Image (cartoon, rainbow, N blue to C red):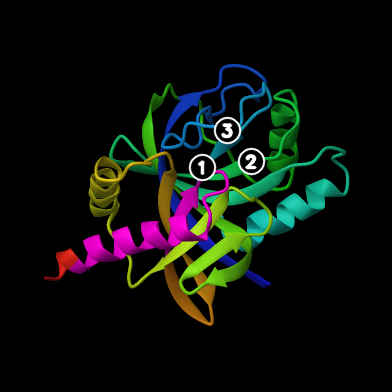
Amino acid sequence: MIETFGTITKEEVLHTLQSNILENTFVLESAAPFPGYHGENIPSSPKPHFIFLITKVRYELEKIIRTAREIRKYFPHSFGARPAELHMYNSVYHAIRLNHLEEFKYIAELQKWFEDLGIGFMKKKKFNKPAIIKVTKYFCLEKTEEGILKDLEDPLMHYLEIPGTLPWKIFETITRKIKNNIDNNNFDAAIGFLYIRDIIDIIRIYEKNPGTERLVALRKHYLDEIKKLSA
């Protein structure tokens, strides 16, 4: 088992929440968090998926983790909290990403706890467009094949090691090309890195039961396309 931190960068449509939030604060929801995958196990319940509390300034990972830990001493409901960076309208916004919330009605209460512990939130803005999202998070992984890791906390997540980082637009172009040239293109992909003694660049695959052969084949497709970039 490998326990570490890293980042995932992805594109999703975000929209401004109008209710269940503190007055005049900027809160976004991702209602369709895995747009490239259409199948079983996509979250479809009325529960919140990913919620982004937009902050006035950038807060360090340690600050957010310590603050969330303090809140859990008193807040009786489950939630996850991680720092996120959102690229929208050619601007960068910083946020706390919430997940594992059971009810929308808990958002405002959580905001109040964060505020009381020194986290400031931006004033409300209207937004309903795609955004590039970079989330710093904890990973619990197991290596299953050379260059392939599975997520031990979410069975739909797997990670393919690649030889270096990719700019988002190039990654997007490569993914589109691969999807257009394989029979089964039903998967969602994102990029990121893990820190395991050193930085390891990865592609995150979201798909139900892809199987080892499928993951090996997808990794080969990406490696072949990356190789072409330097040819």
Where does label 3 land, which residue?
42
Which amino acid, by three-letter code, is at mark 2? Leu
Which amino acid, by three-letter code, is at mark 1? Lys
Where does label 2 land, which residue?
98
Q: Residue at left 46%, top 59%?
A: 213
Q: Earlier in the sequence, mark 3 or mark 2?
A: 3
Which residue is farthest left?
231
In the depicted structure, whether residue 190 falls above or below residue 3: above
**Range of the magenta residues?**
202-227
Q: Is residue 91 left or right of residue 229?
A: right
Q: Residue at left 38%, top 56%?
A: 218
Q: Earlier in the sequence, mark 1 or mark 2?
A: 1
Q: Residues within 10 Å of mark 2 (few under 14, many from 20)?
A: many
Q: Is residue 132 left or right of residue 157?
A: left
Which of labels 1 and 2 is toward the front? 2
The picture places residue 36, in percent across and down from the top left corner, at 41, 37
Which of labels 3 and 2 is toward the front? 3
Where does label 1 land, which residue?
56
Quarter-of-image position of residue 23: top right
Measure the alpha-carbon separation of dots 1 and 3: 32 Å
Which amino acid, by three-letter code, is at mark 3? Ile
Which of labels 1 and 3 is toward the front? 3
